[in-house]
Image (tube, rainbow, N blue to C red):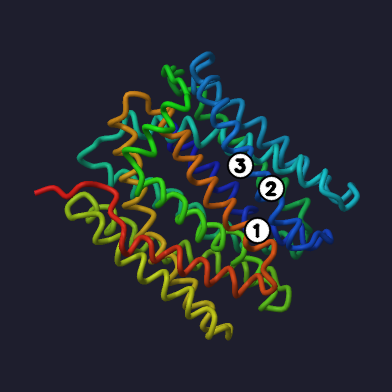
């Protein structure tokens, strides 16, 4: 049932997530305001991930998932009326607060449960199948989202996405209300950094290029195609197709061979693609590079996610491990946003930063070698 909830939730976000930065642009917010929104969002994701593990202890994860649905629906309502507020940092702050609570209340319990109850021997395949289900729901989502935004407006797009969030509530009533004891402490942070240093750095760098792909790339495509939302939707769908084609293969390979081989190939390939963007910005090249993005990012994300869940499953306190993993992710995002806020050419700087961060995965090792 949690898989069904995840697919419906992903479908809802596939309609709208690519277009939130563009929506803010159309309202008159500058790029720096958009980066501030992402800054607030991820700070609150981390803060409320701590809240989420303690709430999970008290009320159980099923109730936390249900609470998340009501938060995301209110967040969507707030987005729909954002145009009625004056352009200032306060609406952006509250938007980041709501989004951060939503993200924390879903991903924290989801990651804990996936690590706790996953099959260690088939974890790569399980991550791969989950990715396939999510990407299948994302193939036509960006195109439909773009079409609705162009023909009916962003408010109607938001309402349409909200319908899927309502639907995602239904499977949760059939989910067992699991409670797991979790304690978050600075001692746990020291242990996390001591025993998982390269893994922590991996989360830092993964979230640097993840921000470029998730925030910068849709805005860049929107502007390069003369403010045409349909092209943003097409490219979002192309990335999803490129990901699906290789997901099952990479998932099975990550169970059978050293995951670091896949990660190194992905790191080099993704670094090269970001460099190519600097020199090949004609429409046909952007479509080709976007398709290859799906493959290269998968080569990093899928085995690295498998490693994440495997490491978490071996910890005495899975929840605390997930929280400190989120802290490392926040550091990466803060570094990127701090640099990009002062960069004169934000797009070129972003692509260079993304390329350099991908190179870390070509040299790092996150697990000990096994004979």
Q: Measuring from the top left, give residue 368's x and y in whole percent.
A: 20, 47
- Position of the N terminus by quadrant: top left
Name the residue located 66 percent from the left edge and 78 percent from the top edge: 224
- Based on the displayed image, in which of its 4 quarters is residue 143 positioned? bottom right
Q: Residues within 10 Å of mark 3 (few under 14, many from 20)?
A: many
Q: Measuring from the top left, give residue 324's x and y in whole percent.
A: 46, 36
According to the picture, the residue beneath numbered tag 3 turns out to be: 164
Distance from label 2 to label 3 (Cα)? 7 Å
Direction from residue 80 to residue 18 in the image, left or right: left
Contact between marks 2 and 3 (CB within 8 A): the answer is: yes
Q: Is residue 304 or residue 169 the one in the foreground?
A: 304
Q: Residues within 10 Å of mark 2 (few under 14, many from 20)?
A: some
Helix, strand or loop for disc 2: helix
Q: Earlier in the sequence, mark 1 or mark 3?
A: 1
Residue 160, numbered label: 2
Q: Is residue 16 or residue 266 the one in the foreground?
A: 266
């Amino acid at each position: 049932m949690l898989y069904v909830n995840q697919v419906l939730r992903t479908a809802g976000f596939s309609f709208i997530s690519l277009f939130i930065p563009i929506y803010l642009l159309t309202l008159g917010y500058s790029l720096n305001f958009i980066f501030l929104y992402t800054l607030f969002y991820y700070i609150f994701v981390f803060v409320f991930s701590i809240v989420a593990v303690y709430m999970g202890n008290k009320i159980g994860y099923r109730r936390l998932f249900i609470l998340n649905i009501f938060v995301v629906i209110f967040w969507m309502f707030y987005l729909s009326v954002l145009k009625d507020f004056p352009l200032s940092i306060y609406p952006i702050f509250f938007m980041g607060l709501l989004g951060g609570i939503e993200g924390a209340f879903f991903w924290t319990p989801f990651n804990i449960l996936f690590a706790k109850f996953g099959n260690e021997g088939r974890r790569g395949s399980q991550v791969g199948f989950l990715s396939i289900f999510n990407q299948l729901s994302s193939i036509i989502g960006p195109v439909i989202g773009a079409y609705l935004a162009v023909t009916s407006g962003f408010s109607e797009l938001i309402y349409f996405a909200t319908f899927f969030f309502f639907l995602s509530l239904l499977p949760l009533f059939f989910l067992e209300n699991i409670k797991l004891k979790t304690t978050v402490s600075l001692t746990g942070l020291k242990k996390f950094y001591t025993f998982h240093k390269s893994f922590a750095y991996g989360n830092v760098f993964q979230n640097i290029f993840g921000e470029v792909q998730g925030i910068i790339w849709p805005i860049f495509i929107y502007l390069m195609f003369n403010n045409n939302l349909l092209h943003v939707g097409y490219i979002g769908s192309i990335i999803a197709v490129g990901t699906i084609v290789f997901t099952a293969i990479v998932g099975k390979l990550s169970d059978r061979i050293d995951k670091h081989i896949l990660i190194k190939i992905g790191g080099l390939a993704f670094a090269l693609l970001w460099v190519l963007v600097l020199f090949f910005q004609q429409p046909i090249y952007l479509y080709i590079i976007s398709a290859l993005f799906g493959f290269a990012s998968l080569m990093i994300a899928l085995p690295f996610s498998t490693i994440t869940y495997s490491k978490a499953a071996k910890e005495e306190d899975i929840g605390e491990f997930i929280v400190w993993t989120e802290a490392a992710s926040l550091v990466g995002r803060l570094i990127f946003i701090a640099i990009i806020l002062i960069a004169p050419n934000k797009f070129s700087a972003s692509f260079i930063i993304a390329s350099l961060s991908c190179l870390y995965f070509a040299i790092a090792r996150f697990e000990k070698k096994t004979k």
